Amino acid sequence: MKIIAQTKRGKFYVEEKEEVEERFTLIADWPFFRGIIQAVEELNVNDLKKGFLWSQKKGFIEEDSSIISTMIARGKKNGLREKESVLRSDYFPTSSFFRKGILEARKDTSKFYNGDKSFRPLNCSGRIIYPIVDNLEHLKKLFDTGASLIQFRVKDKSQTDITALVKKAVELSKKYTFSKLIINDHWEAAIESGAFGVHLGQEDIKFVDLSILRSSGLRLGISTHSFWEVSLALQLSPSYIACGPIFQTRVKKMPWLPQGIRNLSYWVRVLPKPLVAIGGINLSNLESVKQTGVEIISLINGISCAVSPQQAYLRFKERWEE
């Protein structure tokens, strides 16, 4: 073991094995992220250390610094500076969780997260408004208005009630030939009802049988808020990656600082997957979001809390597409 970085929160190190095919393995052991970073190639440990310190000085936490240092070390190997390296999408590593937090008894999930097959694409083009609703009334009104890509997000109900609502939502969506209904969290109900896709948070992914999800043909969207979460998402080859919150939001309390326009611009440039911007987007900041080049924006309060969700959707759609 070669230590790259160690703090009170954990460590980041290289595990070297002599008699296995993958001799060079990067291990992150931090509170939010315990797993393997796929380095693709053997990297210089000193370059990894310098890259880690560089990102720490920029204010990144250890989990993010582990990902960024890997990008920087790959860049150093090819004669690039730090700022050049972090702009290279092909340097962005993928990662996989350990199923258990206790490293001594860990079970690697690289097989569980079989990244050799991508989830089916969204097949969306152009600038798109992606509403999130929590009831069938709003869902129907938005389909009637012409919204195609919609997420159905139901919380604080029994599993029986949620399953029944998901089934009704999918049945409703199939009355509209253009519909693409994404179910939030409840992947088994989404499969059973024949939904277009499912959206999962980072914690949800740990408890999903991705082989079943892939074979179902559902599209997969994943929430991300940081470098290490993006790295984990990329390992799964999802249909899209959601990035947020872009601005402060009242929908739910989160430990993440808003990404802001600068970070969103970075993710648009770096990520190879379709990107969805979410969190605090409204008519007053819509133009600045548009300038980043992101094509899909997801809205909750801006549409669901409006007096007329249909009129709110059309107003956003007009501004977004102009």
Image: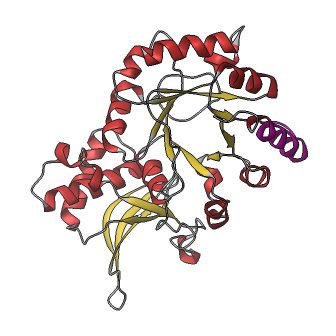
Which residue is more in the foreground, 255 or 87? Answer: 87
Which residue is most to the left?
Answer: 79
Instruction: Locate residue 119 relative to residue 200 in the image: left or right.
Output: left
Residue 113 x/y as whole percent: 54, 66
Instruction: Locate residue 230 relative to residue 22 in the image: left or right.
Output: right
Is residue 265 something one can see in this rendering? yes
Q: Residue visible at 50% across and 13% down?
A: 318
Quadrant housing the C terminus: top left
Q: Quadrant of residue 307?
A: top right
Residue 86 x/y as whole percent: 25, 46
Which residue is most to the front?
Answer: 177
Residue 155 shown in magenta: yes
Colour treatment of the image: secondary structure
Q: Quadrant of residue 43?
A: bottom left
State which region is magenta: 152-171
Which residue is more in the foreground, 313 or 275? Answer: 313
Q: Residue visible at 80% across and 41% down?
A: 166
Count of numbered circles in the view:
0
Instruction: Locate residue 103 relative to residue 270 in the image: left or right.
Output: right
Quadrant housing the N terminus: bottom left
Magenta span: helix, strand or loop, mainly?
helix
Residue 131 x/y as whole percent: 62, 27
Q: Residue visible at 73% across and 54% down?
A: 191
